Image (spheres, rainbow, N blue to C red):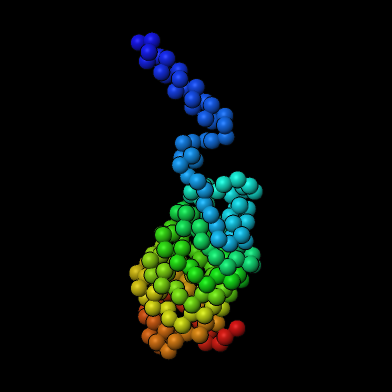
Amino acid sequence: MKLVNMYSVFVFCFLISFNLNGCSSPTEINDPGITFSDPAFEALIREVLNKPSGDIIKNDMMTIHYINGYERNISSIDGIEYCKNLEWINICTNQISDISPFAVLKRLQYINLWTNQISDISVLSELTSLTNLYIGGNLIEDIYPLIQNQGIGNGDIVVISYNPLSAVSLNTYIPELQARGVEIYYSTQQY
């Protein structure tokens, strides 16, 4: 019995010293931190988390539901894939070209990517929770991924103005989205 109590005291003391050394959970020891390829995007995430220094770990990213990164000179969103609970993002007026990290963000409902350098939107076919999508002012020709997204439907808003949309996007895909009840806004003019 004394051996069990001594063991319990040892474990308790270990856990207390573990917490006093600045670690809040064993998860932090196993999570070396996220590396961001774009310093501007890292600065935005640090601002959202109110964490000016130190490692940003996966658990930190899981707490993010909302990101507003308007006009922040962001060129890469690598690392956003850890924001598994993200529902709303505005990263318009940046230099983003690759949005593939969005693929795993299944809770996203609102995306504003207006005025970036995006041409490939294939990842959007997988984001079935989308209700508001603003992708105007980019380099998008093919909007077929929006047709593939069975979650986009009645009452949802899609703005694709100021893109070099292909004839099939204009003449086939836009009418298909409209037939599903999507409020779609577009213009064939370029910025």
Q: Position of residue 189 (x, y in %)?
A: 56, 87
The quadrant where residue 39 appears: bottom right
Horizontal placement of 2 versus 95: left or right?
A: left
At x 45% / y 20%, what residue is drawn?
A: 10
* Rendered location of residue 145, percent (x, y): 39, 74
In this rendered view, identify the residue nearer to me: 102 or 171.
102
Q: Quadrant of residue 179?
A: bottom left
Q: Split into 4 quadrants, where in the image is the C terminus?
A: bottom right
Q: How many marks?
A: 0
Asked if residue 68 is positioned above or below residue 154 in the image, the reply reads: above
Up-down: is 162 above or below 30?
below
Residue positioned 48% across, 68% down in the render = 99
Residue 175 visible within the image:
no
Quadrant in the rendering for residue 137? bottom right
Quadrant of the rendering where the N terminus is positioned: top left
Where does the image place residue 44, in percent across and percent down from the top left? 61, 57
Q: Residue at x 44, y 59 (%)?
A: 105
Could you say which is closer to the camera, residue 125 or residue 31? 31
Q: Residue at x 52, y 52 (%)?
A: 34
Q: In the image, is residue 122 above or below residue 190?
A: above
Q: Is residue 26 left or right of residue 43?
A: left
Residue 45, visible in the rendered structure: yes
